[in-house]
């Protein structure tokens, strides 16, 4: 059997036009050798890339549609007879829309006996009011249901405060929920806040978890916008995002699946990465809990490609122009770097390959505008040399970057350093 | 489950999600169903981690779970007569297990996505209908007023061109 036959079989399989004999032949090929299996895999990796791109485009269109829906509807209105019925329905709808906005949004709670509701420290029963505390123990069960049929199910030990229904439905301090939210009427928001972020739900199903230090959201369906004082991001269906916002500074959030990463740091400032629709790429460095390594993932395709083609094992990346910021990285998986970040100020171990010195020492608490041509990326084999990378103890060094694509390399526009 | 632990496995799941999705697509050939499987796998992963289960290779573990979910789905759909075949699933799983660390699949994926920008509206719409909306070829034939073989050829050609384009981009980068 020829390769052409194999390709035809894969096509038939993909298009669901294959017959029993075809399936049998396909298996023979796949059993035969790895080159066929590779081709099979490639076909579907291609299909995945195609569908995910189409889906991303769809998501953007849907979001834009959501944002412009009101104007869109208005511009398309034409005087027709059946609009009489629509006007009547709209009147009813407006009544419902108006009522909740004038005051308190009621929710019904179903719960097991061990769930505690308190108001000003006193146990309560009956209707929840803004500021009431809901405490769900380890194996407790509680489901909140609002008038619009939106529900929040507490799926683990939970501690949260019932919101006012206008600005916030729920303030979660700790715990995990699954939520199913009915699309909200124009001007209304379904918001859940955690210590790190506010999640605005635009009609969706999602899981949200917080342990007090960070929040994690995974969106099953629809869209969730997350934001704090400085930043915001839109999380689409199938995506997840983390946020750790510490010391009152901005949160970081990473959209997934393609660009998964986390931000964890003592102080990180970051600006203007809300759009997600521009040509800019973004990436971030993450300090691990022990501050011994940094992990970076690029935010967009072009950056990933650039970095990927530089990959040849553990690498030292020198980012240098009138500054002495050095990053030692190794590629841990395609698109994912683990990096050490250190400065000239005595924290490296003196190895020349890690010290390309020029210009000034980065001053803490200042923004830097740096440019990093790809030519500056070079490789050393740190692991094979048995090199122990310098410790980062004593210095909480975090970087947050916003960059854009250039022809000759990467430009990181702003870097905020903290000591 | 420690925060660090969850982070690690989540990261591995998320960075390997395109592969998992491709694996699910290779068996289900339906985007929505494959998405469902991936999300179900995600929930099972979190559940397993919460129960303190040790997972050495997240990608492989996820494929194993996806495999079982796909089998269950097939059984539910009662498509067992011709297509449901755990051996085919095993072979597909094996093909994804064989991805080597230096396999440039990620670069190819990015290049493909880039190549998608150059697609004509007709081809984009065709891919959209078939692979994202999950319309059957017959349904597309009706909508597009084209013959079955014409639609099949167009789809095959577009995908082949995209792969060719991605291959060229990677060559240039090298």
Image: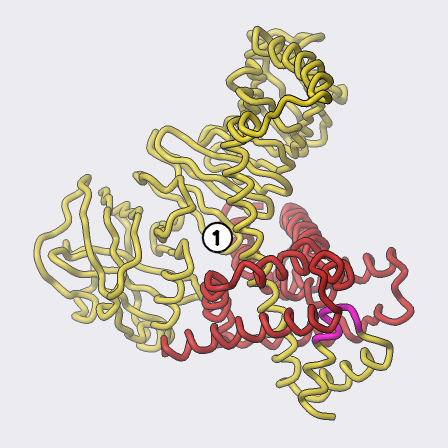
Chain colours: A yellow, B red
Q: Secondary structure at mark 1?
A: loop
Indicate the quadrant containing the N terminus of chain A: top left, top right, bottom left or bottom right. Answer: bottom right
The part of the image, by quadrant, that contains residue A180 is top right
At x 40%, y 45%, the residue is A263
Nearer to us in this view, A237 or A95: A95
Q: Position of residue A187 (x, y in %)?
A: 53, 20
Locate residue A133, reporting x and y percent: 59, 16
Residue drawn 35% across the image and 32% down it? A230
Residue at x-position 59% and y-position 12%:
A132
Location of residue A276 with respect to A146 vertically, above or below:
below
Q: Can the viewer see residue A283 in this picture?
A: no
Q: Is residue A14 magenta?
A: yes
Would you say A406 lies left or right of B92 here?
Answer: left
In-front residue for pair B75/B170: B170
| Residue B72 position in % (x across, y down) | 82, 58
At a point 87% along the width and 77% down the height, the residue shown is A20
Mark 1 closeness class: few <14, some 14–19, many ≥20 residues within 10 Å: many
Going by the image, does A278 lie left or right of B52? left
With A205 as the anchor, is A293 left or right in this view?
left
Badge 1 is on which residue? A260
- Give residue A348's position: percent from left, percent from top: 21, 60
Specify the quadrant of the image occupied by residue A96. top right
Going by the image, does A75 lie left or right of A86? left
């Amino acid at each position: 059997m020829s390769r052409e036959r194999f390709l035809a079989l894969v096509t038939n399989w993909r298009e669901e036009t294959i017959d029993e004999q075809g399936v049998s032949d396909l298996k023979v090929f796949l059993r035969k050798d790895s080159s066929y299996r590779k081709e099979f895999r490639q076909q579907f990796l291609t299909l995945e890339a195609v569908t995910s791109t189409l889906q991303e485009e769809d998501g953007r269109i849907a979001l834009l549609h959501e944002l412009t829906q009101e104007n869109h509807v208005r511009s398309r209105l034409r005087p027709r007879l059946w609009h009489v019925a629509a006007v009547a329905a709209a009147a009813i709808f407006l009544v419902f829309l108006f009522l909740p906005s004038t005051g308190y949004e009621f929710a019904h709670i179903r719960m097991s006996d061990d769930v505690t509701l308190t108001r000003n420290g006193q146990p309560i029963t009956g209707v929840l009011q803004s500021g009431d505390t809901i405490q769900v123990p380890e194996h407790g069960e509680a489901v909140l249901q609002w008038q619009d049929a939106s529900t929040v199910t507490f799926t683990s030990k939970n501690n949260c405060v019932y919101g006012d229904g206008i600005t916030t439905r729920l303030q979660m301090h700790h715990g995990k929920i699954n939520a199913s939210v009915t699309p909200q009427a124009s001007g209304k928001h379904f918001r859940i806040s955690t210590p790190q972020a506010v999640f605005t739900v635009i009609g969706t199903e999602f899981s949200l978890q917080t342990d007090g230090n960070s929040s994690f959201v995974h969106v099953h369906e629809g869209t969730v916008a997350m934001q704090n004082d400085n930043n915001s991001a839109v999380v689409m269906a199938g995506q997840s995002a983390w946020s750790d916002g510490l010391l009152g500074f901005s949160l970081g959030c990473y959209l997934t699946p393609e660009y998964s990463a986390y931000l964890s740091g003592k102080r990180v400032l970051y600006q203007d990465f809300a759009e997600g629709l521009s040509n800019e790429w973004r990436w971030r460095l993450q300090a691990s809990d022990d501050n011994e390594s940094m992990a970076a993932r690029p935010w967009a395709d072009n950056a990933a490609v650039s970095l990927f083609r530089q990959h040849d094992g553990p690498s030292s990346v020198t980012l240098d122009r009138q500054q002495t910021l050095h990053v030692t990285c190794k590629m841990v998986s395609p698109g994912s770097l683990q990096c050490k970040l250190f400065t000239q100020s005595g924290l490296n171990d003196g190895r020349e390959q890690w010290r390309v010195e020029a210009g000034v020492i980065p001053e803490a608490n200042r923004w830097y505008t740096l440019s990093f041509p790809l030519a500056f990326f070079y490789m050393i084999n740190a692991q094979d040399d048995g090199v122990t990378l310098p410790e980062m103890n004593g210095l909480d060094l975090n970087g947050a970057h916003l960059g854009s694509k250039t022809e000759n390399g990467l430009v990181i526009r702003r870097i905020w350093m903290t000591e | 489950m420690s925060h660090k632990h969850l982070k690690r496995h989540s990261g591995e799941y998320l960075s390997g999600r395109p592969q998992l999705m491709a694996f699910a697509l290779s068996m289900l050939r339906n985007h929505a169903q494959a998405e469902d499987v991936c999300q179900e796998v995600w929930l099972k992963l979190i559940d397993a981690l919460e129960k303190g289960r040790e997972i050495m290779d997240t990608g492989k573990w996820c494929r194993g779970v996806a495999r079982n979910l796909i089998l269950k789905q097939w059984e539910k759909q009662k498509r067992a007569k011709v297509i449901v075949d755990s051996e085919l699933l095993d072979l597909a799983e094996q093909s994804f297990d064989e991805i080597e660390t230096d396999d440039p699949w990620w670069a190819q994926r990015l290049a493909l996505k880039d190549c998608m920008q150059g697609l004509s509206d007709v081809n984009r719409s065709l891919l959209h209908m078939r692979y994202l909306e999950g319309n059957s070829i017959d349904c597309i034939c009706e909508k597009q007023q084209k013959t079955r073989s014409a639609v099949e050829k167009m789809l095959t050609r577009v995908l082949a061109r995209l792969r060719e384009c991605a291959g060229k981009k990677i060559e240039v980068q090298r």
